[in-house]
Amino acid sequence: METNEVEILLIEDNPHEAQLTIRALRKQNLANHLLHIDDGMEALDFLFSKGKYEDIDPSSNLKLILLDLKLPKIGGIEILRQIKTDIRTRLIPVVILTSSREEQDLFNCYKYGANSYIVKPVEFEQFSKTIGETGLYWIKLNIPLAAGIPKESDSVS
C-alpha cells in the first residue's frame, strides 16, 4: 500500500491489541488503507512528513487516527497535542483507544482536542464490536470537512 493512500492510522504499541483492532476493522471492510505504527516518534514522523516519510503528505487522505496513550518514545497525549496544534493535521479526527480510566488522561485528551475517548473493552467480542462500530462511524457515517477549507484569516459569518 502506498503511504499516500492511508485513510486510517493506528498508533498502538501492543501487537495483540493492534491485531485485534485491524481484524475488527477488516470485518467492516475498513482496513484496506490502514497503516499501523507502534511508536510515538515514528507516528509523528509519518504525520509531519519527516525521516523515511519525508516524501509523502499523509494529511491528504487521512480520515481517522486511532491513538493509544501509552506508547514508547513519545506518549499519546503529546502526539495528540502536536496533531491538534498543527494546521496540516488539526482537522483529522483522533479517537483515543486506551485502557486508561484515569481522570487526568481523559481531561488532557479532551483539553488537547481528542474527538473521542474509548476505553478498550477487555472481553474479545466487545472489543471487536467497539472497534468495528468506531470505524464505521468515523469512516462511513461521519462527514469530514472536505477540500476548500477556509483559511484561518477568513471570517465566518
Image (cartoon, rainbow, N blue to C red):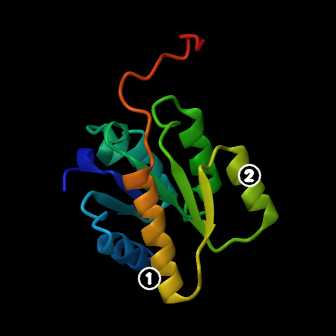
Q: CA distance from mark 2 to mark 1?
A: 26 Å
Extreme residue in the left direction? 1
Residue in the image at 73% along x and 59% along y: 106
Residue 122 falls in which quadrant of the image?
Answer: bottom right
94 in relation to 92, above or below: below
Q: Is residue 126 visible?
A: yes
Q: Earlier in the sequence, mark 2 or mark 1?
A: 1
Amino acid identity at mark 2: Asn
Residue 138 located left or right of residue 123 = left
Amino acid identity at mark 1: His
Relative to the observer, which residue lies in front, 105 or 142?
142
User: Which image quarter holds the C terminus?
Assistant: top right
Image location (x, y in percent) of residue 147? 35, 27
User: Which image quarter holds the N terminus?
Assistant: bottom left
Extreme residue in the right direction? 103
Mark 1, residue position: 16
Looking at the rendered structure, the secondary structure element under dot 2 is helix
Mark 2, residue position: 108
Residue in the image at 26% along x and 37% along y: 55
Dot 2: within a 10 Å radius of its alpha carbon, few (fewer than 14), some, or many (20 or more) residues?
Answer: some
Residue 147 located left or right of residue 68 = left
